[in-house]
Amino acid sequence: MNAEELTMSAGLARSLIHYAESRGVDAGALCASAGFHRDEFDDPDVQIPYTRGLRLFEETARFCDDD
């Protein structure tokens, strides 16, 4: 299985966004910078491509200045 086939749950991504919000990050700006719309995470059972989820993790670290 390659990285393009892997997925992660939208619920995990949503938790990451909530963490960023707790650090004062604008969730809309964070999602946009990672190529998402925040409403993509409304259903925790949805799976998102791993490579897109990884981008969200990277942007969260950048927005939170949390290397």
Image (spheres, rainbow, N blue to C red):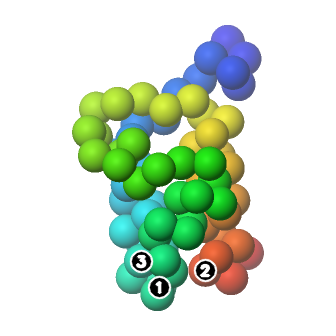
Q: CA distance from mark 2 to mark 3?
A: 9 Å
First of labels 2, 3 by sequence position: 3
Q: Which residue is nearer to you in this view: 36 or 53?
A: 36
Number of numbered discs on residues: 3
- Categorize mark 2 by other alpha carbons within 10 Å: few (<14), some (14-19), many (20+): some
- Work out which quarter of the rendered image holds the C terminus and state it: bottom right
Quarter occupied by residue 43: top left
Which element is circle 1 on? loop
Q: Is residue 45 above or below residue 40?
A: above
What's under tag 2, amino acid-wise? Cys
Q: Amino acid at mark 3?
A: Glu
Q: Secondary structure at mark 2?
A: loop
| Residue at 39% across, 43% down | 40
Q: Are marks 2 and 3 in contact (CB under 8 Å)?
A: no
Q: Is residue 34 above or below residue 67?
A: above
Q: Which residue is painted at 48% across and 77% down in the image?
A: 26
Where residue 55 sits: x, y (%)? 67, 50
The residue that appears at 58% across and 58% down in the rendered structure is 32
Q: Amino acid at mark 1?
A: Arg
Which is more N-terminal, label 1 or label 2?
Answer: 1
* Place of residue 34 in the rendered image (x, y in percent of width and height, measured from the top left): 63, 54
Decide: marks 2, 1 in contact (CB < 8 A)?
yes
Mark 1 surroundings within 10 Å by alpha-carbon count, few (fewer than 14), some (14 through 19), many (20 or more): few
Q: Around disc 3, counting alpha carbons within 10 Å, would you say few (fewer than 14), some (14 to 19), or many (20 or more)? A: some
Q: Position of residue 49 (x, y in %)?
A: 57, 30
Q: Position of residue 56 (x, y in %)?
A: 60, 54
Q: Residue furthest bottom?
A: 24
Q: Which residue is mark 3?
A: 21
Q: Which residue is mark 1?
A: 23
Residue under label 2, please give it.
64
Q: Is residue 7 left or right of residue 57?
A: left
